[in-house]
Image: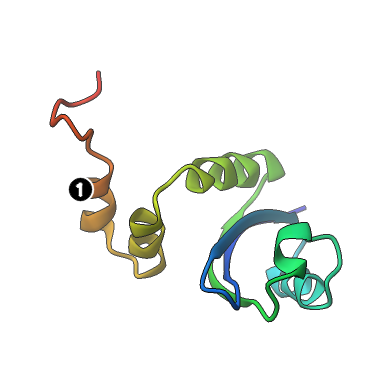
Amino acid sequence: MTAWAYMLRCSDGSYYVGSHRGEYVEQRVREHQSGFGGGYTKHRLPVELIWCQHFERITDAIAAERQIKGWSRKKKEALIHKDWDGIKMLSKRRGGKQRT
């Protein structure tokens, strides 16, 4: 079975990152829209799907979800816009030293 990591833009402008096991991510978005299973999004309707990525395994989708949840708003926006150079730049440590 396939899986997805996805990002929604909520009515208040905030972003919600989640993962879903299933063939179609749109099904999970409809569930969010109806207020089902999404405590955060339930109070920020309507929501809009702004990014998603397909995975073969749910464990990979969950790992991507957790990673993206830890990102800054600017880095999430770089992902939305497919700004790979921006993501790379925003991934650098603030002190300027590269991670080893």
Q: Residue furthest left?
A: 96
x, y percent for residue 99: 24, 23
Label 1 residue SS:
helix
Q: How many numbered marks appear? A: 1
Q: Residue at x 78, y 77 (%)?
A: 30
| Residue 41 location, quadrant | bottom right
Res. 52 in view: no
Along the horizontal axis of the image, is 44 left or right of 87?
right
- In this orientation, which residue lies closer to the viewer: 69 or 84? 69
x, y percent for residue 29: 72, 72
Along the horizontal axis of the image, is 85 left or right of 60?
left
**Circle 1 is placed at which residue position?**
89
Q: Where is 96 relative to 48, above or below? A: above
Q: Residue at x 33, y 62 (%)?
A: 78
Residue type at mark 1: give it: Met
Q: Residue at x 28, y 42 (%)?
A: 91
Image quarter where the C terminus lies is top left
Along the horizontal axis of the image, is 28 left or right of 44?
right
| Residue 60 location, quadrant | top right
Q: Alpha-carbon neighbours of circle 1 within 10 Å: few (<14), some, or many (≥20)?
A: few
Q: Residue furthest top?
A: 100
x, y percent for residue 7: 56, 63
Q: Where is 92 relative to 34, above or below? A: above
- In this orientation, which residue lies closer to the viewer: 86 or 25? 86
x, y percent for residue 80: 41, 67
